Image (cartoon, rainbow, N blue to C red):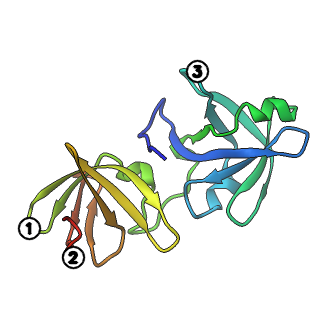
């Protein structure tokens, strides 16, 4: 997934993976492991292919499952209409998201931060994140060089949103 920072004041929340049933329901896979925010959302925005601006949809009903949600959106009445949204990114307003705990961050907050080593060496900007079962990885790029940095306490030493900066203590071989 290529993450984007606040496009139209919205953040990427998940992806429409497929349709569900014949009445136009959709399965949404959130980019976060937590489903808490799915239960709080009142509306979502979906940017369809070829459209410049995302369309707003009110959530009529939802069912949370283990790693996804099945939602019914106002205005989507058939499986054919729902099928046109398959693969599209679901965007939300940041105000609809729950507050994070200390040392917790949403992906959109980390995209664009500058990454340095504890010795002050600049590594590049966080361009994306990859979510793995055991840990997430920061995708840090500078020119043609790319580093995958595990989001674990022994490596990521400091995240400072105010200074747009992440400091890491790389283990041997991580940056080579």
Quarter-of-image position of residue 42: top right
Secondary structure category for the residue under label 1: loop
| Tag shown at residue 171 | 2
Secondary structure category for the residue under label 3: loop
Characterize the local packing of mark 3: few (<14), some (14-19) or many (20 or more) Cα atoms within 10 angstroms.
few
| Tag shown at residue 149 | none
Residue 29, x across and y down, in percent: 65, 53
Of tags 2 and 1, which is closer to the observer? 2
Judging depth in this view, the residue of 141 and 158 nearest the camera is 141
Mark before the other along the chain sequence, 1 or 3:
3
Rendered position, 138 above or below 155: above
Quarter-of-image position of residue 147: bottom left
For marks 2 and 3, give the CA distance.
Answer: 44 Å
For marks 2 and 1, give the CA distance.
Answer: 13 Å
| Tag shown at residue 119 | 1
Q: Residue at x 60, y 26 (%)?
A: 49
Of tags 2 and 3, which is closer to the observer? 2
Q: Quadrant of the C terminus?
A: bottom left
Residue named by callout 3: 51
Judging depth in this view, the residue of 59 and 68 nearest the camera is 68
Residue 110, x across and y down, in percent: 36, 53
């Amino acid at each position: 997934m290529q993450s984007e920072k606040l496009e139209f004041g919205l953040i990427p929340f998940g992806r429409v993976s497929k349709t569900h049933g014949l009445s136009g329901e959709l399965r949404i896979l959130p980019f976060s492991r937590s489903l808490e925010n799915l239960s709080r959302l009142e509306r979502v925005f979906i940017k369809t292919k070829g459209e410049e601006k995302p369309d707003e949809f009110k959530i009529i009903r939802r069912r949370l499952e283990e790693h996804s949600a099945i939602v019914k959106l106002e205005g989507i009445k058939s499986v054919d209409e729902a099928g046109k949204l398959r693969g599209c990114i679901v965007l939300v307003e940041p105000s609809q998201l729950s507050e994070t705990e200390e040392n917790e961050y949403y992906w959109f907050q980390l995209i664009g931060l500058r990454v340095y080593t504890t010795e002050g060496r600049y590594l590049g900007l966080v361009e994306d994140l990859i979510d793995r079962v055991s840990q997430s990885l920061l995708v840090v790029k500078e020119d043609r060089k790319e580093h995958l940095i595990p989001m674990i306490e022994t490596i990521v030493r400091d995240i400072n949103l105010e200074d747009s900066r992440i400091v890491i203590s790389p283990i041997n071989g991580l940056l080579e």
